[in-house]
Image (spheres, grey):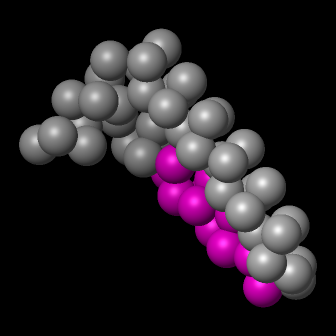
Amino acid sequence: MKLCYQYFLSLISRNNDADRKSNNNDRIIIEKKFNSKHIEHLKLNKTAIYFFNN
């Protein structure tokens, strides 16, 4: 579970770094990509869903 949590933290920090270096349109594209990856991963990883719900 700890590895899973760190994976999500790394995704979030990468997304935030990209936000700072881009304009608003790029930020929206990055958020869409991030959200779709995030949701896809949650669907595949039931442990992650359990972890974030508790």
x 52%, y 58%: residue: 9
Q: Position of residue 15 (x, y in %)?
A: 70, 64
Point out residue 29 in the picture as x, y percentages from the top left corner. Answer: 79, 55
Task: Judge whether 7 appears above or below 25 on screen.
Answer: above
Q: Quadrant of residue 1?
A: top left
Q: How many marks?
A: 0
Residue 22 picture quarter: bottom right
In the image: residue 46, left or right of residue 29 = left
Kindly identify the residue that appears in the image at 76 percent across and 57 percent down: 30
Task: State which quadrant residue 50 falls in.
Answer: top left
The residue lying at 86 percent from left, 67 percent from top is 26
With 39 as the anchor, is 24 left or right in this view?
A: right
Instruction: Identify which residue, 27 or 42, lies in the foreground.
Output: 27
Q: Is residue 31 above or below residue 19?
A: above
Task: Give the magenta range.
Answer: 6-20
Q: Position of residue 16 (x, y in %)?
A: 67, 73
Asked whether residue 17 appears in the rendered view, the answer is: no
Q: Quadrant of the C terminus?
A: top left
Q: Report the residue at 64% width, 68% height from top.
A: 13
Q: Main secondary structure of the magenta part?
A: helix
